[in-house]
Amino acid sequence: MESTKKLARGGFVLLAAALATALCVAWAAVAPAKAYAAGINQTAATTSSATIEWADPYEGSSSYETTSYVVRWGEGYEEPNHSQAVPVTQTSFTIPGLKAGTKYNVKIDYTYKSTYSGNEFSSRLYGDVASRVATPTGVKQDKWWHYINKVDFTWNKQSAADKVEYKVCRVSNGKVFKKGSDKYIRNTYEVSGVKNNIMYTVQMRVHDQWGWSGWSKKAYLFTQPMLNAKKTKVSGNKLTVTWNKISGASSYEVYVSTKAKSGYKKVATVKSSKSSATVKKLGKAKFSPKKKYYVYVVAKKGKYDTGLNYIWNVKGSSVSQTYKN
């Protein structure tokens, strides 16, 4: 009887041991929740780098240990296209070669193993970082809307900016005409109430969590010259083009084509003191009052110009205007 009890007790011990072993193996095969709780923090930045740090997911754990890190980064939220292996003893990294004022998505792939079974697993930390904003570049006129007295200007957008400020000044007296700010970062901004044939400048600066950038260089804003329909015509074999002067312009360029949407050739460049040009030929062909021509004028100020918004149809002394699509 006693031997039967001992046998039963022995069987129970063996069964308990087997269950404990199975549970240990099963538990070792599942990553703990802590693997998904850790994240990435940004601690510093320059216009071309971002420094990050993170916590070792298994620091102080007796069950698991981290065995490797690979830092990955890229713009947007696609799979990052840059990577760098980092020693397992290191929990910080400075990401190099970034674009100024740009947000990046960072992922840290890491491996860890069970101290019980030796089985190895992998997981990922993730977070968003940004390089420092820089003085805005590419600031220039996009379109000047002559008939509603509005001008749009554009710039090289910086996704890391959290605020934009701009100031528009009159060239004639240097006084501020309008100031603006925006927390919604856009490619293009608009200024209403401008006066045609008067030149303005615009400057921008941007802000991030570390502070403001410097002000951009001055960009010039001014309307495309409007043609004088009464004095623009084809007479004989010559085309005469006359326009309204833009105060502050350095020169004017005249373009002509026989097609509305293509084939334009620069036929004249004149100084700012002039407001008309007479052209004898378009390429090798003489002008004819019976043929329709498409004409526009662009004003320039250094490297800046008014761009093209309006085109005139000229046939003899008949002149009408259209908007460029």
Image (cartoon, rainbow, N blue to C red):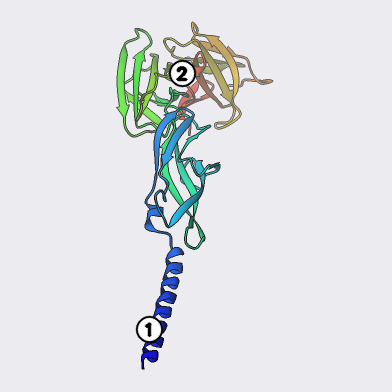
Circle 2: is it few (<14), some (14-19), or many (20+) Cα within 10 Å?
Answer: many
Name the quadrant containing residue 45. Answer: top left
Q: Nearer the viewer, residue 167 or 145?
A: 167
* Residue wearing tag 1: 9
* Residue wearing tag 2: 227
Q: Residue 60: percent from the left, percent from the top? A: 39, 50
Query: Mark 2 against mark 1, which lies toward the viewer?
Result: 1
Q: Nearer the viewer, residue 178 or 158?
A: 158
Tell me what residue is drawn at x 44 percent, y 72 percent.
Answer: 22
Residue farthest along the front direction in this orientation: 2
Q: Secondary structure at mark 2?
A: loop
Residue type marked 2: Leu
Q: Is residue 106 above or below residue 30?
A: above
Name the quadrant containing residue 287. Answer: top right
Q: Is residue 148 visible?
A: no
Q: Is residue 184 above or below residue 219?
A: below
Residue type marked 1: Arg
